[in-house]
Image (cartoon, rainbow, N blue to C red):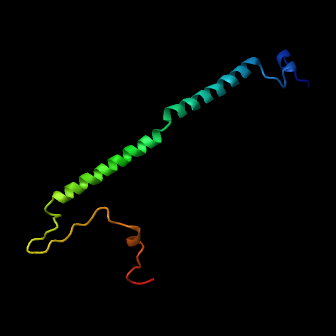
Amino acid sequence: MNSITSRADAGDNLQSSLSIKISFIVYWGMILVGLLATFVLLHGREKEITDFYTTNANSLAYEMGEFIDTREKFSSKREGSDSVHPPISRFSATVSSVNTVPPWGT
């Protein structure tokens, strides 16, 4: 049986219609505009967020240090003892102290 083709399908097998071409241009144009707007709006935002988190972490560490230093329970002088133990430094960890040989050997 022969299939009956409409007049529009007979001459337009490999060519797109004008509405598809316009839709294609509009679609990719909107994608490009969206990407450009994203880059413009978010330019430098990562640095701002990192600085904000760093500032908050440093503030929290300072506040916790002040809190610990003001508590009697964490005081460096013990009752009944004449010696004063030096406070543990919060920022004294170094790479050399981490890479030591364990007491049981290698």
In this rendering, the answer to whether 99 lies above or below 12 is below
Q: Nearer the viewer, residue 92 or 17?
A: 92
Q: Nearer the viewer, residue 37 or 28?
A: 37
Task: Name the outermost residue toward the left.
Answer: 80
Which is more toward the observer, 1 or 100? 100
- 64 on left or right of 46: left
The residue that appears at 41% across and 79% down in the rendered structure is 101
Pinpoint residue 75: horizontal percent, then vertical percent.
16, 64
Residue at 46% across, 38% down: 45
Residue 21, quarter of the rendered image: top right
Q: Is residue 92 left or right of residue 49?
A: left
- Measured as percent of width and height from the top left, residue 54 is found at 37, 48
Kindly identify the residue that appears in the image at 58 percent across and 32 percent down.
35
Quadrant location, the N terminus = top right
Image mark count? 0
Picture coordinates of residue 8 (x, y %)? Answer: 83, 16
Q: Is 43 left or right of 102, judged from the image as shown? A: right
Vertical placement of residue 23 versus 75, above or below: above
